[in-house]
Image (spheres, helix red, strand yellow):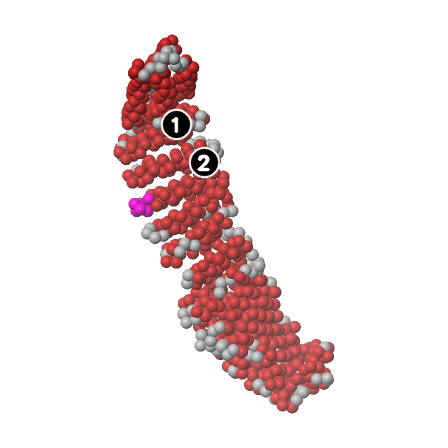
Amino acid sequence: MREKKNIKKATEIVFIIIIICLLALGCVLDTIIGKEHYENESVVVMAISFLTLAFTLWFSYLFIIKQLYENRFCNKSIGRIVFRGSKSLIFLYVALLIVGIIILFVREGLFFFSIAYVIDCVLLSLLCGLNIYFGFATGELNNVIKDKVESVFDSIKISKDFQKISNEFEELVSIYDDAYLRNEKMTCVQVIDAYFVFWKTFIENRNKDLMDGVDGVKDAWKACRMFQAKLFKDEDSVLASELNRKILRKIRDLIFECLKCEIDSFMDTYLDSIITAVAQNECLLKNQAMYVFSIFAYLESKAMELDKKEFFRKFIKKAETVYFIGINELKERVDGQYWRYLSKVITDASDKYMDYADLLFSELQDSILNRIGFDNEKSAYGAIASIFSKKVIENNKNIKQGIYKLVKNLIDKGVTFNDEFMAFIGWISKQYAEIGESDMAFDIRYCFVESVIDSRSVVATQLFPDFVQKAMSCMNNEDEVKQLSGKLDYLVYKALSRNRIGWVNQLLSVLKECILNTQQKDKIVQEMWISTYQRAINIVAINSDYKMQYIVLESYKEVIVEMDSKKIISKSLMKKVIDDLSITCESHYRQNVDFICEIIETINAFLDNKTGLSLILEKEVRVEIYKNLFDIAVNSIEKGQELVIQQVSNAFGWRIKSLIENGYQEDANLLLDYAFQMYKLCILNKISEQTIVFIGTLFVVIGAFASTKKPYYKYRNKIIDNLSDDLHNKNYLYVAKMLRESNVTGWTSLLGETPKVYFNEFWHIFDEKCNKPKK
């Protein structure tokens, strides 16, 4: 500034010397060369007029400037700046005016002197312009502002009076506000700069008094905060935007100084001042939200450089607070800006500072995922995509894991499962697959399906995780298969619990394919997968949804049949399947008798020739099925479940007929023995006569069937020998015979065109045996 003053003074001296020299030169030239009859009146008059006009404009400008600023600054200061150098200019003006008058009176012989005079008038006018330039354009007036601000802070340093300090700040505020209204950017900037220079110096010097909260100094700090809050302008104008941004930048620099000096109290105050300003100033939030987030990104990067984790965490949390404020006011704009901010920090941190990755991703989840109701899903997808698109993701385990967890949590939080979200899930899982992270891709899709089952009945087949491929790849790892089958089992459980028929069909189809891709040697793996079917059977056994029961049971039966046809099911596994189904019947007869009867029918169907089961050629398997059906019947007799008893009796009856026809003598005899035991147990346990007669029908029908051909007579004789010793049996079988004869046309497929003949033949022999005296 002193250098500018010296330049101004030197310029004025040079101009004065030139003016005097020109007049002297003109006088000398006129004396030596002189022109006697030269008329110079008009030229001199024009020069005097021009000089007077320039001088008047200059002097008027000075008075106008003085009037503008005298209400904001003391008159003495303004006068010192505005009229600096004016005395010499006034003296030169008066001198040139007198010289001009003399020229007009003399007129003759002043040719060169008149030319010099005209040039001097022009030079003086130019000098008036330079006076204005040096006085204002070079910032001398702004020094008044600076001096005023510095005097305020000088007073703060020595004052203990809060009211006095507040008054000083109020004066600065009035200067700032007045300059703002007059659109005087430079004055506003001077106030801002002086304020923040003061505090930066203060922080750098680490004034312990203020940091320790000494009385008086603490009041000064309070007054400063109040002053700073008044600097922000809540207007949507270019000047307001520029000033607000400058204030934010200055606050950022002060926070950085606090970071370097580890002054927590100052840092918290300045961070809170940003948050308060954003909360109270809608225009600031609207126009500077991204800049505010960039400030936090800058501070976080500095905290990482200085390895100050606690401060880093603090900056993250404060940025989150700004985000929450924006959510309520300008959610659409702030969402995207906040995500871009965090994306930038995460990306910038990826190379050197991965210790901070967990904090960053935790912040993403805590701030955005917890506010999912504010419709910020779209910006969330875009932000994740922007992070993932960075090539660093391929080589950075932390970010890769972070995004993976973030996407899963995004799904868990219950976003809107619309087309956009599904497209995003498809894209992100594909990205993981392409960088060789197929397990992560699978888990993302699994997590999606797990959540979407709760909200949508429509099956998203395009996003279904590839269980089959994964099952094949981990076939030799029982632990992985156990984990994988457990995941599919849970999906089946959810779909069944929520009655999602479409999902159940899809899941059972996948389960079926996983099972059919195994080999007989993979018995343990097969058991893991089949256990899901068994659990599904137990679930649907409780409810009364016939359609769901049919889907599950039919799918289970199809799997067993196809496993048998591909010869990938062992005898031991088949026996386990039958045992598990039998246990289900015994466990759930109270909840759903009709479904238990369906299971009995399914077990019995495994023995049908039409199923194509090769395992029925294995006697061991057939015997296991017979035994399980009998055990179900015995359990039902004990618990009085007559419908189940009748179902087993009916299964035994038709099975015995088939065995007799196909020459399975031992099997037929075994089932007849089981039927005799059922019959007798029903009588002993006082089962209703209706059920006893129903079982008696088995003996009447098989007895009649055995009468159709001589090789079958032995089975008829076995029935008669086992039941003829008790006259009560005769009564039960007689009722059974009467019932079957009443619908005799229904038995033509079994007994030929004359079924009644065979019924009567069996009954005649049985009756004779019953009436025959006992030895």
Residue furthest bottom in the image: 710
Above or below, 759 relative to 388: below
Instruction: Point out which mark residue 187 bears.
Output: 1
Residue 431 vs 368, above or below: the answer is below
Q: For the view shown, which residue lies furthest in the top direction?
A: 105
Task: Report the number of numbered marks.
Answer: 2
Of residue 126 and residue 215, the one placed in the foreground of this image is 126
In this figure, which residue is indicated by the disc labeled 2? Answer: 284
Three-letter code, disc 2? Leu
Residue 364 in picture, x, y percent from top left: 42, 49
Start and end of the magenta stretch? 302-309
| Camera-side residue of 189 and 582 | 189
When asked about the image quadrant of residue 211, the answer is: top left
* Residue located 57% across and 59% down the image: 458
Q: Amino acid at mark 1?
A: Thr
The residue tagged with tag 2: helix, strand or loop?
helix
Residue 318: numbered disc? none
